[in-house]
Image: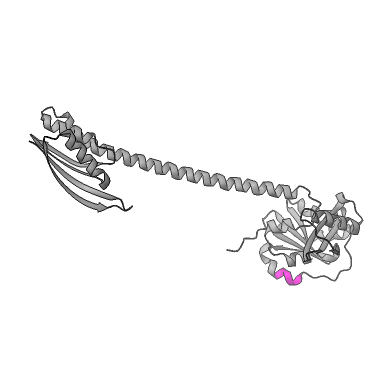
């Protein structure tokens, strides 16, 4: 999906200024050429801006100002040694100050660099003085616009026309804290993403535990529903009450389906893992060796491949 562009463009050429929406940048590219030999004066820029229809500006508060390369000091330099990314802005600033004859605080600049070889870097520097550029910004800033300055050739070579990319390549003053601010911004975004992931995991875990608790409560309630009527029946025989207590002592993983008892016999239907069946039956038989037992079982596999047995046990007093 293409990135939406939402800013305005002020195109300066000759003694005129035209306004466009950023979505029209493709139509602008063929027009980004100029044969002017020098930068206009502040008076000429102000006169040019008097004819601009500010009411036609798009509602977006961001404005990119495009100016011909000839209005700037554009110099190219070949560095015969590698320069780190952190030192490139300082190197470009020194060339900009040298070409504009302005102090570092009064210099606006941008640069493009290409690595020609392992030991050579090609540096192109765009520069102007801050005092000269102020008329380009003032009229638009009075309209509440956030403005950035870019040269024709820069804009044509941009790999992206998004506002964030244009802002990173703009002609501006030296920003020693820019890289640090970028790192802080990236860390903040990483923190936000990490926080969202943790919250999503916490919500998922809470949902899982809630479902597990509900499932356990339902299983317990089923056992209680099966046994509650018998525990309240004062007329039940001692044999039936003994068999009922035996069922109530079953482990949690045993699911009791039905319990029927009358007189001297009882019938129990329940499901449990196959590995538990022998242990449960041996325990019961050791507790009541005098009883007679009839066991019927049907083995099946669950979704997670666990072997489960449906058991029907009939018990008779000898």
Q: Which residues are magenta?
A: 27-31
Q: Nearer the viewer, residue 256 or 251?
A: 251
Q: Residue at x 82, y 63 (%)?
A: 124
Question: Which residue is rendered at x = 65% and y = 58% of the image?
Answer: 6
Position of residue 214 in the picture relative to residue 43 (left or right)? left
Residue lying at the far right in this picture: please name it. 101
The residue that appears at 11% across and 32% down in the rendered structure is 239
Q: Quadrant of the N terminus?
A: bottom right
State yes or no: residue 4 in magenta: no
The correct choice, above or below, for 199 with respect to 93 in the image is: above
In the displayed structure, 130 sits above or below 236; it is below
Name the image quarter holding residue 45: bottom right
Query: How far across and down, in percent of the image, does residue 255 sit?
Result: 25, 42
Residue 167's quadrant in the figure?
bottom right
Percent x, y of residue 13: 81, 66
Can residue 178 be spotted in the picture? yes
Residue 96 percent coordinates (x, y):
86, 57
Give whichever of 140, 227 is nearer the camera: 227
């Amino acid at each position: 999906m293409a990135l939406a562009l939402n800013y305005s463009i002020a195109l300066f050429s000759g003694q005129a200024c035209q306004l466009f929406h950023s979505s029209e940048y493709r139509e602008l590219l063929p027009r980004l050429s100029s044969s002017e030999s020098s930068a206009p004066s502040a008076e000429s820029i102000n006169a040019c801006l008097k004819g601009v229809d500010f009411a036609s500006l798009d509602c977006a508060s961001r404005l990119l100002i495009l100016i011909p390369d000839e209005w700037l000091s554009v110099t190219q330099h070949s560095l015969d040694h590698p320069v780190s990314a952190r030192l490139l802005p300082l190197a470009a600033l020194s060339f900009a100050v040298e070409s504009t004859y302005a102090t570092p605080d009064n210099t606006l600049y941008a640069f493009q660099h290409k690595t020609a070889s392992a030991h050579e870097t090609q540096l192109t520097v765009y520069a102007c003085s801050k005092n000269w550029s102020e008329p380009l910004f003032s009229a638009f800033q009075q309209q509440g616009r956030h403005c950035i300055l870019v040269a024709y050739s820069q804009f044509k070579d941009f790999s992206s026309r998004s506002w964030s990319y244009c802002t990173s390549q703009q002609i501006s003053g030296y920003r020693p804290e820019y890289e640090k601010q970028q790192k802080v911004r990236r860390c903040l975004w990483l923190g936000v993403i990490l926080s969202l992931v943790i919250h999503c995991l916490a919500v998922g875990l809470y949902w899982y535990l809630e479902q597990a608790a509900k499932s356990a409560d339902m299983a317990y309630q089923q056992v209680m529903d099966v046994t509650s009527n018998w525990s309240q029946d004062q007329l039940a025989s001692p044999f039936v009450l003994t068999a009922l207590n035996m069922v109530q002592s079953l482990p949690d993983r045993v699911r009791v389906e039905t319990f029927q008892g009358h007189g001297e016999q009882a019938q129990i239907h329940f499901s449990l893992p196959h590995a538990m069946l022998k242990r449960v039956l041996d325990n019961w038989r050791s507790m009541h060796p005098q009883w007679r037992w009839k066991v019927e079982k049907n083995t099946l596999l669950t979704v997670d491949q666990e072997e489960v047995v449906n058991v029907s046990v009939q018990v008779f007093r000898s």
